Image (cartoon, rainbow, N blue to C red):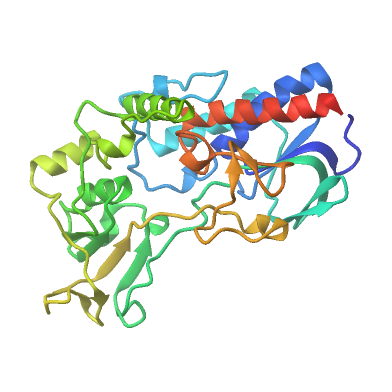
Amino acid sequence: MGTRGHEVDVVVVGGGQAGLAAGYFLRRAGRRTGLDFAILDGGAEPGGSWPRYWDSLRLFSPAGHSMLPGWWMPEEEGREYPSARHTAWYLSEYERRYDLPVRRPVRVEGVERAGDRLRVRTDRGNWRARYVISATGTWSAPHLPDLPGRGVFAGRQLHTVDYRSPEEFAGQRVAVVGGGNSAAQILAELSPVAETLWATRRPPRLLPDDVDGRALFSIATRSQQAAERGESAQGVGDLGDIVAVPSVRRARDRGALKAEPMFDRLTPTGVAWADGTTWDCDAVLWCTGFRPALHHLEPLGRLGPDGRVAVEGTRAVAEPRLHLLGYGDWTGAASATIIGAGRTAKGAVAEIVRELAER
């Protein structure tokens, strides 16, 4: 199965945590079977999306519970919960440690059928592969709600992907929109330096202080196992939505996490509710989530209304030579987490290796 130009057994699209986890298992399989593969990453540097996260972001789990297969994440000095910068370093070192064949920057423009292969079109030439693993994540596909008045507001509008630190908002009035972890963490550090309003569609729910990523992963695992047996079990959503990391707990304790109902529209000077209440502000920060970054898969068939691809496990229903990793629970329980990426990657690669052997 030696590489012939741009023809390999498997192309992995995306060099973040899910793509690297797949690379680990593909590398192990290659030593046994001769399987060859390439990881095509659109980023200019290693680390997936982690180098682009805001400065104060912390993982929900300690380093000892935030690992890709084969190598525990080293602890970050002085921090129980690793920073985004430390996580980016870990992914970069992981890539080097296992000598993974990552090519970057390579922008994948489309994946299409080409006889008994899949053709991967990129801005640096085409690749042919027996299988494709899509692991592009969601960070490059931010979601903005279609709210009236977004085009008339004269202040700044930013998404989570645009936020770096609170200093640029010092002394301003900022509306933070969204009821998840990003909104809570950003609000926690904005509120001491800016006048903030937190707008959510439903009352935000903080998880108990003793519940972090370790417990969430265990709950998600048990819930998935119960579902596979046809049973019901407590899911993560039953406990709450927001992990009470130290910065969020401090903000809660000083009363900074009081949420208001979602406003109905934007005005030239701020936001407004249906009852006529208004709040003027300098900026609106949309912490409103992401969609799976799957435009490169459109040549294989129409994406669903939510931007997803129908899957059985990690395999695409409409194209069995395609697997999807790391996009959320629909591609495997906790698959969008660092520790969860390894489990789903292991299963997907095992299926691919088995089918290649049968051929």
Q: Can residue 129 be seen at all in this image of the molecule?
A: yes
Q: Can residue 99 be seen at all in this image of the molecule?
A: no
| Residue positioned 71% across, 20% down in the render | 28
Q: Position of residue 253 (x, y in %)?
A: 9, 40
| Residue positioned 20% across, 40% down in the render | 206
Foreground: 186 or 148? 148
- Residue at the farthest left position: 254
| Residue positioned 48% across, 31% down in the render | 338
| Residue positioned 32% across, 78% down in the render | 148
Q: Position of residue 37 (x, y in %)?
A: 77, 34
Q: Is residue 305 left or right of residue 240?
A: right
Q: Position of residue 199 (x, y in %)?
A: 21, 60
Q: Is residue 211 left or right of residue 31?
A: left
Q: Position of residue 89 (x, y in %)?
A: 50, 33
- Residue at the farthest front position: 230
Foreground: 345 or 49? 345
Quadrant including the N terminus: top right
Q: How many marks?
A: 0
Q: Image quarter for residue 251?
A: top left
Q: Image quarter for residue 85?
A: top left
- In the image, residue 247 sits, relative to residue 112, either above or below, namely above
Foreground: 66 or 214? 214
Q: Is residue 4 left or right of residue 96?
A: right
Quadrant including the C terminus: top right
